[in-house]
């Protein structure tokens, strides 16, 4: 009798196997790449919208991250990129490094919000007033992020990231494009390398409307794969967006 082989479920990003001949890029234990590799994946692999409905297109995702999307239409593309970076810094205890610019150029620091300051827009600028008790809990942090999502986006991100060569790609980098009225941004979640030094990478996105953050399928292959290769002089084709050449960037 032939023995039945039971497939072991993939429960985290670090358990997603690299392509044949590749191994994961070595990173420091404190690196964002190591943090990403510990992130849990949902078992049902369904992308949900912020209102609980299933997304119409269920073919873009390879896996779905077990990260809340919230109940408002806020955590869209650039917001998910900021969420992943901010969560890493928060859980690493690097609270003073958490901050994002609004589209109007004003800066919103998490440390200020945690100290009790709340912002409101007056004449297209943020007025900060201390009206709450200091609270650095994660629930308060999520409220801070909702504020950021409301006033930041791909346009404001443009001032916070800078182009890098593909040869230096690392987890935590982003593919980013501004646009009118919309741009897009996705996060590099993991990187693998072969003996020749060639690199492939994994991407995660949210989209419009706000939806579960998900690992992207690679639509450039007929295989079920989340690993991308790229010629940086050419476009990068993802399931729901095409990024222009040289759109790989890193947070400043």
Image (cartoon, helix red, strand yellow):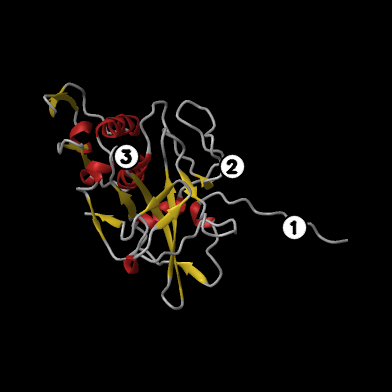
Give the image location of residue 92, x and y in percent. 32, 48
For image coordinates 74% across by 57% down, the residue present is 5
For image coordinates 42% across by 26% down, the residue present is 71
**Residue at the outermost top position:** 131
Q: What element carries label 1?
A: loop
Give the image location of residue 44, x and y in percent. 59, 39
Q: Residue 5 carries which label?
A: 1
Q: Name the residue under label 3.
A: 182
Q: Quick check: 232 above or below 181?
A: below
Q: Are marks 3 and 2 in contact (CB under 8 Å)?
A: no
Q: Name the residue under label 2.
A: 43
Q: Residue 17 carries which label?
A: none
Q: Quick check: 111 above or below 20?
A: above
Of label 1 and label 2, which has the lower sequence position?
A: 1
Give the image location of residue 61, x and y in percent. 52, 46
Q: In the displayed structure, does residue 183 sit left or right of residue 19? A: left
Disc nearest the viewer among 3 and 2? 3
Give the image location of residue 67, x and y in percent. 45, 39
Q: Distance between the residues labelled 3 and 1?
A: 47 Å
Quadrant in the rendering for residue 57? top right
Q: How far apart are marks 3 and 2 (CA)?
A: 31 Å
**Residue at the outermost bottom position:** 196
Q: Distance between the residues labelled 1 and 2?
A: 19 Å
Q: Is mark 2 on a helix, strand or loop?
A: loop
Q: In the displayed structure, does residue 57 sit left or right of residue 131? A: right
Quadrant in the rendering for residue 250? bottom left
Q: Which of 171 and 93 is in front in this view?
A: 171
Crowding at mark 3 (Cα within 10 Å: few <14, some 14-19, many 20+): few
């Amino acid at each position: 009798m032939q023995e039945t082989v039971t497939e072991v479920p993939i429960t985290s990003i670090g358990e997603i196997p690299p392509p044949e001949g590749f191994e994961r890029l070595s990173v420091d234990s404190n690196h964002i790449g190591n943090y990403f590799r510990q992130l849990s994946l949902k078992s049902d692999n369904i992308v949900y919208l912020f209102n609980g409905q299933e997304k119409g297109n269920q073919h873009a995702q390879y896996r779905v991250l077990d990260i809340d999307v919230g109940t408002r239409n806020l955590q869209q593309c650039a917001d998910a990129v900021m969420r992943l970076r901010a969560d890493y810094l928060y859980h690493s205890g690097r609270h003073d490094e958490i901050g994002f610019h609004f589209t109007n150029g004003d800066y919103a620091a998490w440390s200020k919000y945690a100290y009790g300051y709340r912002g409101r827009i007056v004449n297209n600028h943020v007025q900060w007033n201390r009206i709450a008790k200091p609270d650095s809990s994660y629930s308060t942090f999520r409220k801070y992020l909702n504020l950021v999502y409301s006033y930041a986006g791909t346009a404001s991100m443009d001032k916070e990231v800078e182009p890098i060569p593909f040869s230096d790609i690392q987890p935590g980098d982003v593919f980013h494009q501004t646009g009118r009225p919309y741009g897009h941004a996705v996060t590099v979640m993991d990187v693998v390398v072969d003996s020749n030094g060639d690199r492939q990478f994994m991407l995660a996105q949210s989209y419009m409307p706000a939806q579960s953050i998900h690992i992207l399928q690679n639509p450039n292959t007929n295989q079920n794969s989340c690993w991308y290769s790229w010629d940086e002089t050419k476009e990068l084709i993802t399931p729901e967006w095409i990024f222009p050449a040289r759109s790989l960037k890193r947070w400043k």
